[in-house]
Amino acid sequence: MDRSPPAVTRKLLRVLDGGHEFPPPIWMMRQAGRYLPEYRATRAKAGGFLDLCYTPELATEVTLQPIRRYGFDAAILFSDILVIPDALGQHVRFSEGEGPLLQPLTLEQLVDLDASSALDRLAPVIEAVGLIRAALPTETALLGFCGAPWTVATYMIAGRGTPDQAPARKAALIDPERFSRLIDLLVTASIDYLVAQIDAGADALQVFDTWAGVLDEAEFERWAIEPMRKLVEGVRARRPGTRFIGFPKGAFGFAERYVAATGINAIGLDWTAPLAVVRDVLQPRLAVQGTLDPMRLVVGGRVLEEGIDAILETLGAGRLIFNLGHGITPDADPDHVTAMVKRVRAAGGRS
């Protein structure tokens, strides 16, 4: 049982609840990952990537590694968005150098997916949530997550990531009725999964819609906004007040509509979002998260400092969660992350 102080003592959660913090809370997408030598050692011990996700003690260890090293204001559960299709019965594997590989799904094969035992398959992930919360410092928020239904569906149909996820886009246009059944199945499974994460100790939830940016206006409304709205409402119907961060990558042009329709507490933005527009249009409505280009973190030095300062100077007076505009890449130097955290946290003294 979590006997830590009330959640509002956690800096990131105060921002999600409408407060302002400066310096802002900071964490990093993919903060537990291959750029860290300790992660690589633990992954080697686990064997396969899914073995790492499904072994609670090892998933806990890699989740905690960046917290020990950098003292981020939030930890995020170490898992993968594709545990949902795996739990539904679609074969998923990870190949070194190729990323995730799935047996491509046709819409005619929807009948082969079974949600009845999905939570049983995901039980080790939920166990890890409880172990992580128990091991974290009380001031550190714990984020649970899942993939957005659209993004997960694109991998399920294509079998892998492709430049524009054309197989799923084509399926959605040719047979929207059956594609909708796949999306609805993913919404239902994701709601159950996220509620279980909240019950196990997650303070807030992030939903990753990595491929939202490939959709046109009408398709974005149907496959990104509407499923996200159902997901948020479904979780809150069972766990009122649940905090959500939505991350529709590459879809800044639809961000206002996405925010208004989904009821999220914060929106994650990639590095292409214009900072002044974010400040003037989005920040008055909710917290924003991002938007540092991960390449600046790779390069480091003055380039990194300029990127950090531009974000803090433009967005620091509003509700901000400092983060990258996408996940950290394996070629990033851990010392550059140290420099980033130090510069963000020193900003209060420079203001």
Image: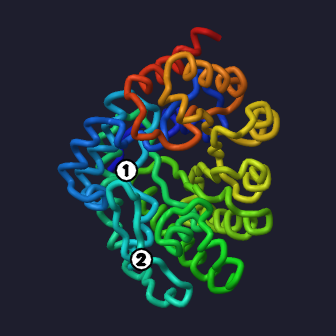
Residue 212 in the image, given as x and y percentages of width and height: 65, 59
Q: Nearer the viewer, residue 223 or 166?
A: 166
Q: How many marks?
A: 2
In which quadrant is the C terminus drawn? top right
Q: Amino acid at mark 2?
A: Gln
Q: Which mark is residue 54?
A: none
Task: Identify the mark nearer the N-term, 2 or 1.
Answer: 1
| Label 2 Cα neighbours within 10 Å, binned few <14 / some 14-19 / many ≥20 | some
Q: Residue at x 29, y 51 (%)?
A: 59
Q: Is residue 199 visible?
A: no
Residue 198 in the image, given as x and y percentages of width and height: 45, 56
In terms of secondary structure, where does tag 1 sit?
Answer: loop
Q: Residue at x 69, y 40 (%)?
A: 272
Please tell me whether residue 87 is drawn above or below residue 217 in the rendered image.
Answer: below
In terms of secondary structure, where does tag 2 sit?
Answer: loop
| View extreme (top): residue | 350
Please tell me whether residue 285 is drawn above or below residue 164 in the rendered image.
Answer: above
Q: Is residue 277 visible?
A: yes
Q: Amino acid at mark 1?
A: Phe
Q: Residue at x 55, y 55 (%)?
A: 208
Q: Nearer the viewer, mark 2 or mark 1?
A: 2
Relative placement, left or right, of 74 versus 68 is: right
Q: Nearer the viewer, residue 188 or 40?
A: 40
Q: Residue at x 78, y 50 (%)?
A: 253
Q: Which mark is residue 103?
A: 2
Residue 220 in the image, given as x and y percentages of width and height: 73, 64
Residue 151 in the image, given as x and y percentages of width and height: 57, 64
Residue picked out by circle 1: 78
| View extreme (left): residue | 45
Please tell me whether residue 92 is drawn above or below residue 264 in the rendered image.
Answer: below
